[in-house]
Amino acid sequence: MPDPVTGPAYLFVYGTLRAGFDGPMARWLRSAARLLGPATIGGRLYRVADYPGLVPGPVGLVQGDLYALTDVTAILARLDEYEEIAAHHPLPHEYRRDLSVVQTTDGPVTAWIYAYAHDAKGLEPIVGGDFLACARPADG
């Protein structure tokens, strides 16, 4: 996994961390980082449970939000816990943190993403690639 200290200070989110989602971690992220606005990434979005999984690729388009990270190391460490990919979580992890190019209204930006790390076969695709358009109400 690339080093967050030397990596980009941007994060692309597409599910329960989006600015328009009213969950505890989405609220925390809005307070811990600066929302830059909408962004997209190539790939497909699938419903894993009450949350989505992103499979990046050349087919499809996923809607999300781009954040500027003020304290990259601390924010990514907390998100790694949330996504259960920190070193103490058992393998195989459901997600992996990667660098990817996302598109913004101002052009492409390299950002951290949490990509779904399992085979998406059998998962329900989220048509239109927008989790907020089909999200169920958040708990708490």
Image (cartoon, rainbow, N blue to C red):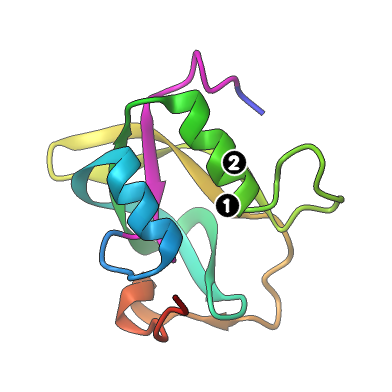
Q: Which residue lies furthest to the front in this view?
A: 140
Residue numbers of the magenta segment? 3-18
Tag 1 near tag 2, CB within 8 Å: yes
* Helix, strand or loop for disc 2: strand
In the displayed structure, 138 sits above or below 98; it is below
Image point 64% across, 81% down: which residue? 123
User: Badge 2 local density, few (<14 within 10 Å), some, or many (20+)?
Assistant: some
Going by the picture, which residue comes out furthest to the left?
106
Give the residue displayed 27% in from the left and 44% down from the top: 103
Quarter of the image for residue 88 reads: top right
**Label annotation for residue 140:** none
> Horizontal and vertical percent for residue 46?
54, 74
Q: Where is residue 53 in the image (x, y as percent from the top left)?
A: 56, 65
- Which residue is identified by label 1? 115
Q: Does the magenta stretch include residue 16?
A: yes
User: From what the image shows, is residue 130 above or below residue 136?
Assistant: above
> Residue 97, labelled with which disc?
2
Determine whether, in the image, residue 10 is placed left or right of residue 5.
left
Image quadrant holding the C terminus, namely bottom left
Question: Label 1 neighbourhood size at 10 Å, few (<14), some (14-19), many (20+)?
Answer: many
Q: Write the residue at 22% across / 44% down.
A: 35
Above or below — where is 92 with respect to 20?
above
Residue 111: % across, % down: 40, 35
